[in-house]
Every structure is written in structure tokens, then in C-alpha cells.
Amino acid sequence: MSLLKLLKNNTRNVLIKCNESQLIFISSRKLSIVPSSYDGENPAPKFFSSGIQILLKRLTRPDYAKVFRKRSNSNAPMLETPQYKFLTDEELQIEKEKANQSADRLLQMPPVVKVHEPINDVLSKDPALVGFDSAKYLFTDISFGVANEHRLIVERDPDGILRSCDHDVRKRLNQIYFPMLGRKIREPLIFADDEKLHSLLDRQKYEYVLDRACVQYEPDEPKFQKVTSITYQHIDTNMQYDLLRSTRHFGPLAFYLTWHKCMDSLMFELVQTGAIREAVLLMSLRHAVHGDLKNGADSDALGKQVLTTPVQLSKSEYLTEEDIQLDNKCIECLDAYIVNNSTMKSQQGLALQGFREYYQQMVELSRGLKKAHGTA
Amino acid sequence: MASKILAIRNVVNKPLNFFVNKIPQYQTTGYNLKNISTTTIACLNFFNKLPAEKLWKSVTSVSNAGAKKGRGKGAGRIRIRDLNRGQIIGTGKINMLWPGLSAPVIRGRELLKQQRLPDDPERMEKLIKLRDSMTRFRRLRLSPIERGWSGSRMPGRSIGAPDPVGDEEFTGFDTKVLQLRPLLIMKGSLGRTRNYQAMVVTGNGQGLAGFGIGKAKEAPAALRKAKNRAGKKLMNFDIYNGHTVFHDFFTAFGKTKIYVQKKNEGHGLKCHRAIKEICQAIGIKDLRAKLEGSNNLQHIVKAFFVGLLQQRTHQQLAEEKKLHLVEFRAENEHYPIVVASPSVVRTKEEIPKDETLDFNQYIMNDRVIFRRKKFPRFYETMPHYEIFLKKYEKFRNHEKIRLNLKVEYGEIKSFLTDKYPEPKEEKET
């Protein structure tokens, strides 16, 4: 009975040792993820470094069909009539360039920064004002053109101390005087009530939760980091990375997993789906963040080579010799990673073996085709 | 007042009559028994001298001059009733059993005898009710699904698929009546004769449709002819993305002009009812059409079909212009989607300066739609509207606030409600 109880309100996984030393994983439906935030070292310098940004954007695997999917953002009752234009080649190129820019805008990643420190500075102590009133007085500078984070907001306590306000008070007053569209003064229920959040996560509405969190919170708020980390962990345990691909949240997800050194199931998923080049990019991301890979230099060099190739949205049917060479290098590199650094050695090894066999067939097929066409 | 007094007098008199009548009753019976006459008497009077037809005519007829003025029509009109309806030979006011007339002669092993049965007090009421029901004019009632554009009239109603031609059956087709009208024709021998003309559209909702006109002496025959003719004149139309036309276009037939506009999904059919029926027959779901000039129905139908047939596909347009045709949709963040590319694309230098490059202008053949100026609504210029706006100003956000409070507390309350609660009405006590 006590075992059952333990199972019912267990932590993430329960390991039970049976006879013959067999491991049984029982993952609980009722989830109790321990959120972790960036409260130690500041991740911002690494996250914003150009190398890592490029890697994260590439790992997002942007598919324009999903980036520009039909969205009903406007509250118009009807869809607008589409516009048509006659364009020359050059004009079309310009339009595509514009679309790329707007894709960059849509895929701009929410920043990953350290949790902010509490503000605690006393500006002045005036004993003459002790007991002037029973309530606090808040003063806000609402002059135009001052950024919200630099706005002067102070409070006079009943004991006569004049101090700068803490973050939560600052946020509330900023929202009152300069409201942000979609942000609520009181915390929405989906963030205040854990059950509501988990029901959304169970329905796999990850993008919705993350978008909503971006609107409601600043990236350096502890609540933001708590909500996002719960969501990322939920995605990680359910291996639902595809739901975040082509959205702006994939980069922070990959960065989070790499930062906390738990990117092995992401790596497993990449190998399993045959995205071998992205797996190498993930390796070089790990090396750029932690620098703890044995073959880190190799993966960095290989990653740079991979970045020059176009994004593979679907499995290519025809392989050139250069592709085969690059992919073989990637497989070797991954093999070394699995042996030296992976925490899921057996699973990843099996997946890589499966990919190798499949890839061998593909290589033979494309070489045979070449011979048949007489181009070899 | 007089009738009331009479009624009261009757009631007062009744008991008196009762007593008074009692004595002479014996006398009268005695008197009648004494005088039995065997001679026949012909009870001739106005009602049984003339046949019912003539009698009714005398009541219902209106003089020629009166008819011209419109008498004998409308609400107060007297209608001919068949008084024989509901009456059976052998039954009458007095409920008698007549063996061989209203009953069999032998029932079981018993010979039935002529006898009086208890009276049926509701018989007369039933008869009157039956007669009344004949007088009221009843319009044919249709279920809302079967109904057309207006009441029980034919236009807008469905009359099924055309009849099969040989072995070919029109499966999935449906025909809608667009017009059914009588035509009066003068003939040398017959004078003015009445013909019916019907116009129908038939289609399978998947791009195949046609219209037909039929004429006949009777309306159903005209409809059938039109339907079968429409089935023989089917045309195929391409539908863009399965929901609308390829582009805006202008089309005309006679004095009828139609401006058709392509619309996005969910817009619906906003056009003349005949055009709507045609679109449904073809399978077009979203479109706007503005009618100008004559609203002759046959011309509308013909103009619309001509316009649909003259549409050009995107590939044709791209080939004509030798330029890429690119679609921008607001719901896709204006991402450029190339819908058609020509085999050879012109460069910017090859395009003449005065060529129309605007898609809408090109497709409408440089015709510009006149857009009427929008005037403010009639009440918006009135002083009371300004007063209303001023008064409403302080309530303008209440709806949103109520919703937010419901989200926050589950009911409408504020931060003051705990301190100063609303007085609750106790209804159950």
C-alpha cells in the first residue's frame, strides 16, 4: 500500500530494483517537475555570443510553411482578401528578402539571462516623517521617453525611509502607467494555478504557454524562468521537440537543455530522425557552452562546415559525394561523443547504428542511380 | 339591450309556458289524430325550386362593374360551400336506425327493426365546423427546408436532378428554379393563351453546372423541360482553392452589369439571390457581386455565366504578362507565394513605361469601380446621438470590466465588496 502511495505522489521517475537487477521505469502522469532557473553563472554572454546564436537559429530548423502559417491574430471577423502582384525576378527576390527579414523577426529568441537581484537601496532616512501616515507613498516619474527599466520609482515608508521600489512594485506601476498589450496586472490563472498550467502542458500547448509567459513576464523574472523551465522539462520528458521547431522558443529550449547538461534525449531524437548534421551542431553547442567534450575541436570544425550547407527540412532522396563525405564525418564525430560524453550510451548507440545501416542503403542507391544515368 | 330583455323574458316565461302547455298538449294530440290527410302537398319554395349552383351564384356573384372595382375579393369574400359534404343518407337530425339503408337488415341471426336511437347532440356542431373549414383559403405550406425565396412560390426551390439521358444519370446534381412566369400570347384562332416559361440552373457543386429555359402550356412541364435542357448544357468551371473565383471580373449582358469580387474563405456569398443559387450549383463558396443597371433575371444569369467562362487562370495571366504572379495573404504575414510563373520572365527594362502592372487594374481591363462616398448614419448627425455618446462614455468599459471580474473572482465584485458586502435578498423565506 505504501508503495502504491509512493507511486501516486512520486517524483519524476521511480526506480524499482527487481530481481535479476532489471530496471523498470515508471513515469508518473501527475508530474512534479523541479524547476531550475539561471541563478548561478550568468548565461547571457554565452547566449548572445554570435557563434551560439547562429547554432541555435540553425537548430530551430525554420520551415517557412510553419513560420508563416495561418494565424488569426487580428480580431477581424473575416479573413482579408488576398493581394496579387505581377513581379519580375528581381522584385520577387526583394520580396523574398523581406520575407526572410520578417521570418527573422518572428523567430527572434526570447533572451536567456540571469535572474535579477532584489533592489534594496535606501535613498534617505528622515526620522521627522515617522508615523506621517499609515500607508506607503509611491512616486513614479512618468515623463515621456524613459525606458521602463530606467524609470524612477520610489516609495516612502511610514517609518520615514525613502527607498527604491523592488521589481514587483516597479512592474505593477509600469504596467499601470504604460500598459503593455496582453500583460495583466494580476497574474493570469494559468501561471498562478499549477493545475491549470499542467493541464495545458498535458495537452501539449507548449507554444501557447511560452508565448503567454513572454508577454506576462520579463526574461529576468524568477517566475518566467520557473514556468519556462517546467515547460522545457515537460517537452524533454515527452520528446515533443518537433512542436517547438520553427518557433522562436526552440533556441532557448536547446540552450536550457545544454546549459543543464541534459541534452541527451534531444540528441537521441536527432539521431533517431536522421538529422545527423544537427546532432553535430548540438555537440558544438555543448562545447561552446561548457567546453567539456573530448573531440570538441573536431565538432566545432565540422559544425562550421555544416552551417554552410542548406537546412534539411526533409530527407533528401539523392546524395552527392560531398554529402556522403560530410555525413560520414558527422557519424564518426557522433560516435566519439556517444562513447565519451553521452549519458544515454546504449540508446544513442543503437539509434546511430540504425541510421548507419539506412544511410548505407541510401548511398548505394544514389551511387547506383548515378551509374545508371552514366554521370559517374 | 332589446335582445337581452327578450332573453330574460324567455327565461321568466318558461316555467309559465311549462304549466300552460301541459294542459293543451293532450288536446293537440287528440286534434291531430282526428285529421289525417292523404293528399300530397308540394312544398314549393325558393330554396328547393332552384339548383344549388344557381342559389350559390346569386349569393356570390359580383356584377361586372363591381368586379372591375375589385369587389368580391379579399377578406369579406363569400365562398361556395358544399352543404352535402359530411351528410350521409339515412342519418339526420333524428337519429333513426333504418334497416337496409343505414344499417344491415340482419345482424347475426336477428332481424333488425326500425327504431329510434338516442340523439347525437354534437352532430350539428361537427357539420358546421366542416362547412366552415371549406370557406377558409389555405395556402400550401412548405417545410423551411423546401421553401424557396418566397413562400410556396417556385423560384428558389429545388426540383431534383435532370432526367437521365440514355444510360447517363445525373448523380449528385440538384436543380434550382430561378424564374417561373406566365407568358400571354395572342393566337388567331384561340385569342389570348397562357404559356409558362421557366429558367433553372443545375449543378453538382463540384464545378459542373448549366442553365436552361423551358416553355410549356403548364408550369410543371415548363420546369421539366428547362431542367432537362440545363442538364444537356453543362459547363465546367475551375474553382480557386475549391472556394472562390480566380480573380475579380466585370461582366455584362444587355443593360445588366455585374462586378464580381474574389473573397477569402469564410466570407460567404454576398450577391443577388439568383447568382447565389448559381454559385451553389457550381460549388463557389465565397464571392461578392454588385449588380448595376437592369436587373432582368435572365440577363443576370447569362452575364454571370459569361463572366465565369471568361475568367483566366493564374497560369494564363502569368503567361500573358510574362511575369511572376505572387499572392500575399494577411493571415500568413504577407509571405509571398508564387501562384504562377511564366516560361520566360521579362526583366524590368523590357516592361514599357505605360503598361498597367497593377493586378486589379489589369484584370478589370482598366475599368474602375465607382465607390460611393460613405455618409454618416442618419442618427449620427442628430443632437441626441451626441448626448447619448456623452452619457455612455462612463459605461463604455463596463462590459470588459465585468468580464475581467468574472475571470478573477468568479462573480462581479470588487476589492470593496469584502468590506461593504451587498445586501442579499432572501427569496426562499
Image (spheres, coloured by chain):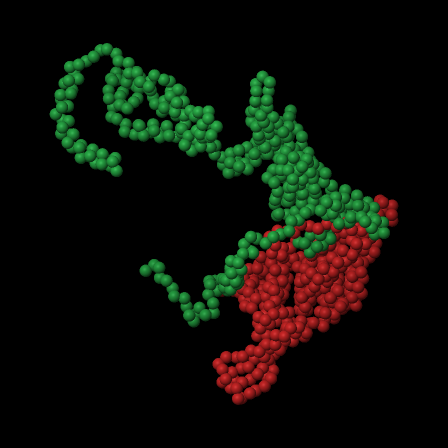
Chain colours: A red, B green
Viewer-proximal residue, B231 or B387? B387
The answer to whether residue A241 is seen in the rendering is no
- When asked about the image quadrant of residue B80, the answer is top left
Q: Looking at the image, which residue is at 67% across and 37% down?
A: B255
Q: Is residue B231 above or below residue A219?
A: above
Write the residue at 51% across / 64% down: B394
Can you give x and y, in whole percent of width and height, for residue B40 in the image? 25, 12
Which residue is outermost to the top?
Answer: B39
Q: Residue at x 30, y 21 (%)?
A: B91
Q: Position of residue B250 (x, y in %)?
A: 70, 42
Q: Residue farthest to the bottom? A: A128
Q: How many marks?
A: 0
Taking B98 as reference, is A128 left or right? right
Q: Is residue A330 above or below residue B116?
A: below
Residue A308 in view of the camera: yes
Q: Position of residue B133 (x, y in %)?
A: 39, 30
Q: Position of residue B196 (x, y in %)?
A: 58, 27
